[in-house]
Amino acid sequence: MSASREDILQELGLWPQWRRRDLPAEIENSLEHAASGNAGEAPARSTPVVQKKSGALTSPVLPLDQRVAEIAGMEWPQLKQSVADCTACALHKGRNKTVFGVGDEKAEWLFVGEGPGADEDIKGEPFVGQGGKLLDSMLAAIKLKRGENVYIANVVKCRPPNNRNPEADEVAQCEPYLHRQIEMIRPKLIIALGKVAAVNLLKREASVASMRGKIHDYRGTPMIVTYHPAYLLRSLPEKARAWEDLCFAVETMKGLQSAAAAPT
Ligand code: SF4
């Protein structure tokens, strides 16, 4: 039996009132991470890196410009293999699995977080565990479902140690993958989940509070900013604001769909 709207809002903690959940240590770490907000500087060009010989990236040392160009020409299978084999930044050293992204490759909705946590690193899928459960509830609250017209990805594909924010050079090496994913998905709307994702996508330092409630532009695609689910797990005020953001996103999507359907 499908969940009622009240069930979903209750799951989100918005009905009838919020109650705190007991959080595992990993989520607590993630919350401290999300609250610290010390990442987001514009990524800088970095020194060439050594890569594992696999897929199309066959050069052992590939300048970033060349790497960007090669990734920009990849199709899905090649892109997935390249991520699976990638050693372009230091994050590969501590990972169990790369976390490529999941969902409908023709989705209108794209949700982007900052990077994998412990659960994601083990399973190889973004937003699993408590934060993922909340994200799924948020999707359900606006009648969406993971994998159905929804794609979920992260700015970096490997877990930063101790859930720290990704460094600028790590983002610079990894974001060509996200760029290519977005080029192929061609979503109508991007939802940036949390400050780290938002500032790395928009390339400017700002708080989530100052970025939410507006339609931003990410390389030609409209983008809305809201809070990271891990942060929402313990923050009542932001949880209610996240619901406002979701409603704003739904209205924005309706406008985008109407504009796309209008005769030219
Ligand atoms: Fe490669 Fe991205 Fe993983 Fe770094 S985080 S090793 S760039 S896939």
Image (cartoon, rainbow, N blue to C red):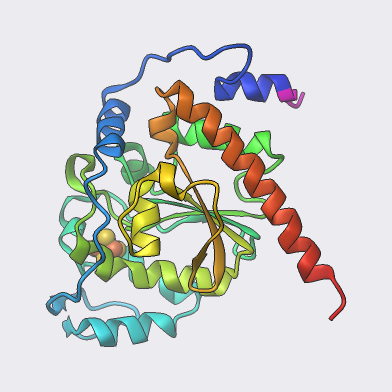
Query: Residue 149: where, in percent of width, then height?
Result: 67, 55
Query: Residue 106: where, in percent of width, then height?
Result: 64, 65
Dominant SS in magenta = loop
The image quadrant in which ligand 1 is located:
bottom left
Q: Nearer the viewer, residue 109 or 105?
A: 109
In the drawing, does residue 239 fall left or right of residue 34?
right
User: Which residue is painted at 15% across and 56% down in the image?
Assistant: 93
In this orientation, does residue 18 appear? yes
Q: Nearer the viewer, residue 129 or 32?
A: 32
Magenta region: 1-5
Identify whether 124 is placed above or below 45: above
Q: Is residue 56 magenta?
A: no
Q: Quadrant of residue 20?
A: top left
User: Which residue is painted at 64% across and 60% down in the image?
Assistant: 107
Quarter of the rendering occupied by the C terminus: bottom right
Q: Nearer the viewer, residue 243 or 93?
A: 243
Quarter of the rendering occupied by the N terminus: top right
